[in-house]
Amino acid sequence: MNSYIAANDAPLKNTGQIKLYSAADFDGMRAASQLTARCLDEVTHMVKPGVTTQEIDEFVYEYGRQNNAVPATLNYRGYPYSSCISLNHVVCHGMPGPKPLRNGDVLNVDITFVLDGWHGDSSRMYIAGQPKRAAERLVDLTYDCLMAGIDAVKPGNRMGAIGAAIQDLAERERCSVVRDFCGHGLGRLFHDAPNVLHYGRTDEGVEMRPGMIFTIEPMINLGKHHVKILKDGWTAVTRDRSLSAQFEHSVGVTEDGCEIFTTSPAGLHKPGLSVPKAA
Ligand code: MF3
Ligand code: CO
Ligand code: CO
């Protein structure tokens, strides 16, 4: 299905049609997304050995509460937390818990705040303490993959251009792209059409049009791309237990390219790599 519909005329559910949003809708997305981005900025200062991921999750909940926002993940399909926190070989949907972070842990924090009905969905990689070289390399590459995908967003291109750009870069560096999870349309819904694949070919997928809003959220593994889900029903890990990284932005297609809604206001795009080490 590749038809488009003005978001205002569309039912508030995923019908498979692609919603096209107005300038006022973009304002709403910008506000929600900037709240998410500011919270991810704050998380930078919390990530260190000894801190538990539960403490980070509680901070996220409280940050939302103080800003009239609710975390979209809380009670979403039974998911019980305000964030997803995925450590080391966890690919995505890691659950916050009581285990303290250890020196060298690499983690993704994924937050979606709902503000005035709009969803701002973004995630970044952080490193507790002293990063290992392989981890830094993967985090850096994964960020570059996200940005390469974003560079492919402009009216007239097909959605496949995003996946092709990401896959090219990841595989050139002998890493792999996770197939089992993808980006998604969003707006007043958390997960909507279209699916945004992080691999593929430039001539695949629907054509991008101004007003489309979706996430790009590539998961890149140092080893093979295969994943499995743990018994908790959520946590996705690499089958070969290799390190996995992910970055996510919410973006909107403009007349001549795209707007990144979830850019870091503090410039902490790669917080795992940009925090000065303690003297
Ligand atoms: N925030 C995730 C995404 O990027 C979705 C998490 S759904 C949850 O789409 F239920 F696991 F929280
Ligand atoms: Co998402
Ligand atoms: Co997310």
Image: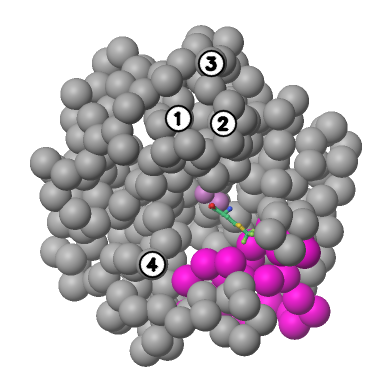
Q: Name the foreground residue: 94 vs 104.
A: 94
Measure how far apart labels 4 and 3 are at the Cα level.
32 Å
Measure how far apart labels 4 and 1 are at the Cα level.
21 Å
Q: Which residue is mark 1?
A: 213
Q: State yes or no: discs 2 and 1 in contact (Cβ < 8 Å).
A: yes
Q: Secondary structure at mark 4?
A: loop
Identify the amino acid type marked 2: Gly
Q: Disc 2 or disc 3, which is closer to the eye?
A: 3
Q: Secondary structure at mark 2?
A: loop
Measure how far apart labels 4 and 2 are at the Cα level.
22 Å
Up the image or down, 30 lies above or below 235; here it is above
Q: Earlier in the sequence, mark 1 or mark 3?
A: 3
The x and y percentages for residue 56 are 76, 61
Q: Earlier in the sequence, mark 2 or mark 3?
A: 3
Q: In the rendered structure, find residue 187 and report the number of the disc placed on it.
A: 2
Q: In the rendered structure, find residue 9 and report the number of the disc placed on it.
A: 3
Give the magenta part as a residue range: 79-105
Q: Earlier in the sequence, mark 4 or mark 3?
A: 3
Q: Earlier in the sequence, mark 2 or mark 1?
A: 2
* Image quarter in which the N terminus is found: top left
Residue 260 visible in image: no
Residue 92 visible in image: yes
Q: State yes or no: discs 4 and 1 in contact (Cβ < 8 Å).
A: no
The 10 Å Cα crowd at callout 2, few under 14, some 14 to 19, many 20 or more, is many
* Image quarter in which the C terminus is found: bottom right
Label 4 within 8 A of ligand 1 by Cβ? no
Q: Name the foreground residue: 49 vs 173.
A: 173
Q: Earlier in the sequence, mark 4 or mark 2?
A: 4
The x and y percentages for residue 145 are 30, 52
Up the image or down, 52 lies above or below 80; here it is below
